[in-house]
Image (spheres, grey):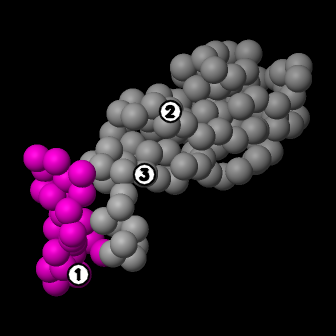
Protein backbone atom coordinates (compact mmCIF):
# COMPACT_ATOMS: atom_id res chain seq x y z
CA UNK A 1 0.00 0.00 0.00
CA UNK A 2 2.75 2.52 0.80
CA UNK A 3 5.52 3.45 -1.55
CA UNK A 4 9.13 4.35 -0.87
CA UNK A 5 9.17 7.88 0.57
CA UNK A 6 10.81 10.77 -1.26
CA UNK A 7 12.77 13.23 0.90
CA UNK A 8 12.19 16.87 0.11
CA UNK A 9 13.90 19.53 2.27
CA UNK A 10 12.94 18.05 5.65
CA UNK A 11 9.67 16.58 4.45
CA UNK A 12 8.64 13.14 3.26
CA UNK A 13 6.32 12.71 0.28
CA UNK A 14 4.60 9.32 0.24
CA UNK A 15 2.04 7.85 -2.13
CA UNK A 16 -0.50 5.85 -0.10
CA UNK A 17 -3.10 4.30 -2.32
CA UNK A 18 -4.41 7.24 -4.38
CA UNK A 19 -3.26 9.91 -1.92
CA UNK A 20 -0.01 11.79 -1.65
CA UNK A 21 0.92 12.48 1.97
CA UNK A 22 3.42 15.21 2.81
CA UNK A 23 4.77 15.07 6.35
CA UNK A 24 7.51 16.90 8.18
CA UNK A 25 10.22 14.45 9.15
CA UNK A 26 9.97 13.93 12.89
CA UNK A 27 10.16 10.14 12.83
CA UNK A 28 12.67 7.85 11.12
CA UNK A 29 11.95 7.37 7.42
CA UNK A 30 11.27 3.65 7.80
CA UNK A 31 8.60 4.33 10.45
CA UNK A 32 6.98 6.96 8.24
CA UNK A 33 7.02 4.68 5.17
CA UNK A 34 5.43 1.84 7.14
CA UNK A 35 2.91 4.00 9.02
CA UNK A 36 -0.80 3.29 9.09
CA UNK A 37 -2.30 5.52 6.34
CA UNK A 38 -5.32 6.41 8.47
CA UNK A 39 -3.06 7.55 11.32
CA UNK A 40 -0.99 9.68 8.92
CA UNK A 41 -4.09 11.39 7.57
CA UNK A 42 -5.81 12.08 10.88
CA UNK A 43 -2.88 12.77 13.21
CA UNK A 44 -2.28 11.31 16.64
CA UNK A 45 -5.72 11.75 18.17
CA UNK A 46 -6.06 12.59 21.85
CA UNK A 47 -3.28 11.01 23.88
CA UNK A 48 -3.64 12.78 27.23
CA UNK A 49 -5.46 15.33 29.38
CA UNK A 50 -3.52 17.86 31.46
CA UNK A 51 -3.10 18.51 34.30
CA UNK A 52 -3.17 14.95 35.62
CA UNK A 53 -4.98 14.27 38.92
CA UNK A 54 -5.45 17.84 40.18
CA UNK A 55 -7.21 18.84 43.38
CA UNK A 56 -9.81 21.53 42.77
CA UNK A 57 -11.56 23.58 45.47
CA UNK A 58 -15.36 23.87 45.42
CA UNK A 59 -16.68 26.78 43.31
CA UNK A 60 -13.35 27.28 41.53
CA UNK A 61 -12.25 26.60 37.97
CA UNK A 62 -9.52 24.46 36.49
CA UNK A 63 -8.57 24.65 32.81
CA UNK A 64 -7.71 21.40 31.01
CA UNK A 65 -5.84 20.85 27.77
CA UNK A 66 -5.21 17.82 25.60
CA UNK A 67 -2.04 16.22 24.35
CA UNK A 68 -2.26 15.17 20.71
CA UNK A 69 -4.60 16.45 18.03
CA UNK A 70 -8.36 16.55 17.62
CA UNK A 71 -10.65 18.28 15.14
CA UNK A 72 -13.04 19.19 17.94
CA UNK A 73 -13.41 18.00 21.51
CA UNK A 74 -16.37 16.83 23.56
CA UNK A 75 -15.55 17.37 27.23
CA UNK A 76 -17.26 15.09 29.74
CA UNK A 77 -17.53 14.91 33.52
CA UNK A 78 -18.25 11.35 34.69
CA UNK A 79 -19.38 10.51 31.12
CA UNK A 80 -21.89 13.39 31.00
CA UNK A 81 -21.09 15.85 28.18
CA UNK A 82 -20.64 19.20 29.88
CA UNK A 83 -21.24 17.73 33.38
CA UNK A 84 -23.90 19.05 35.78
CA UNK A 85 -24.28 21.05 39.01
CA UNK A 86 -23.69 18.02 41.27
CA UNK A 87 -20.37 16.89 39.77
CA UNK A 88 -19.22 20.13 38.19
CA UNK A 89 -19.45 21.48 34.67
CA UNK A 90 -16.95 21.77 31.85
CA UNK A 91 -17.09 24.24 29.00
CA UNK A 92 -16.27 23.49 25.37
CA UNK A 93 -12.89 25.17 25.89
CA UNK A 94 -11.93 22.67 28.64
CA UNK A 95 -12.50 24.90 31.68
CA UNK A 96 -13.97 22.84 34.53
CA UNK A 97 -16.01 24.51 37.30
CA UNK A 98 -16.18 22.49 40.50
CA UNK A 99 -19.57 22.09 42.19
CA UNK A 100 -20.55 24.23 45.19
CA UNK A 101 -20.24 21.26 47.59
CA UNK A 102 -17.92 18.25 47.64
CA UNK A 103 -19.70 15.39 45.84
CA UNK A 104 -19.88 11.83 47.17
CA UNK A 105 -17.53 10.31 46.10
CA UNK A 106 -15.25 13.38 46.10
CA UNK A 107 -13.58 12.62 42.77
CA UNK A 108 -14.81 12.96 39.19
CA UNK A 109 -13.40 11.88 35.86
CA UNK A 110 -12.75 14.50 33.20
CA UNK A 111 -12.64 12.99 29.69
CA UNK A 112 -11.78 14.61 26.37
CA UNK A 113 -13.20 12.83 23.30
CA UNK A 114 -12.12 13.72 19.77
CA UNK A 115 -15.12 14.49 17.56
CA UNK A 116 -13.01 13.45 14.57
CA UNK A 117 -11.69 10.00 15.46
CA UNK A 118 -13.27 9.27 18.87
CA UNK A 119 -9.90 8.83 20.60
CA UNK A 120 -10.13 9.87 24.23
CA UNK A 121 -8.13 10.42 27.38
CA UNK A 122 -9.10 11.12 30.99
CA UNK A 123 -7.87 12.42 34.29
CA UNK A 124 -9.33 12.15 37.79
CA UNK A 125 -10.09 15.34 39.70
CA UNK A 126 -10.46 15.39 43.47
CA UNK A 127 -12.86 18.05 44.76
CA UNK A 128 -11.79 19.59 48.08
CA UNK A 129 -13.54 22.06 50.44
Q: CA distance from mark 3 to mark 2?
A: 13 Å
Q: Which mark is residue 67?
A: none
Q: Is residue 20 left or right of residue 70?
A: left
Q: Is residue 2 left or right of residue 106?
A: left
Badge 3 vs badge 1, beta-carbon distance below 8 Å:
no
* Residue at 21% across, 69% down: 4
Instruction: Answer yes or no: is residue 8 visible.
Output: yes
First in sequence, mark 3 or 2: give its number: 3
* Residue at 76% across, 23% down: 100
In the rendered image, which quarter contains the C terminus? top right
Q: Is residue 88 left or right of residue 66?
A: right
Badge 3 vs badge 2, beta-carbon distance below 8 Å:
no
Q: Nearer the viewer, residue 92 or 124?
A: 124
**Tag 2 secondary structure:** strand
Q: Please give the range of residues in magenta.
A: 1-25
Q: Position of residue 76 (x, y in %)?
A: 58, 26
Q: Position of residue 25 (x, y in %)?
A: 30, 75
Circle 1 or circle 2, nearest the eye? 1
Q: Which residue is mark 1?
A: 10
Is 18 included in the stretch rendered in magenta?
A: yes
Circle 3 or circle 2, nearest the eye? 3
**Tag 1 secondary structure:** loop
Q: CA distance from mark 3 to mark 1?
A: 20 Å
Disc 2 crowd rating (10 Å Cα; few below 14, some 14-19, many 20+) is many
- Asked where in the image residue 83 lies, by quadrant, the reply is top right
Q: Which mark is residue 113?
A: 2
Q: CA distance from mark 1 to mark 2?
A: 32 Å
Q: Position of residue 92 (x, y in %)?
A: 45, 31
Q: Which residue is mark 3?
A: 44
Amino acid sequence: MSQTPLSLAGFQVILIGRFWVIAEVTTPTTQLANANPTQLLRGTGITGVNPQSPKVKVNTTQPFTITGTAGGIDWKVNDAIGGNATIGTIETNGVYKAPSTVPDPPSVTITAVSQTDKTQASTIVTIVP
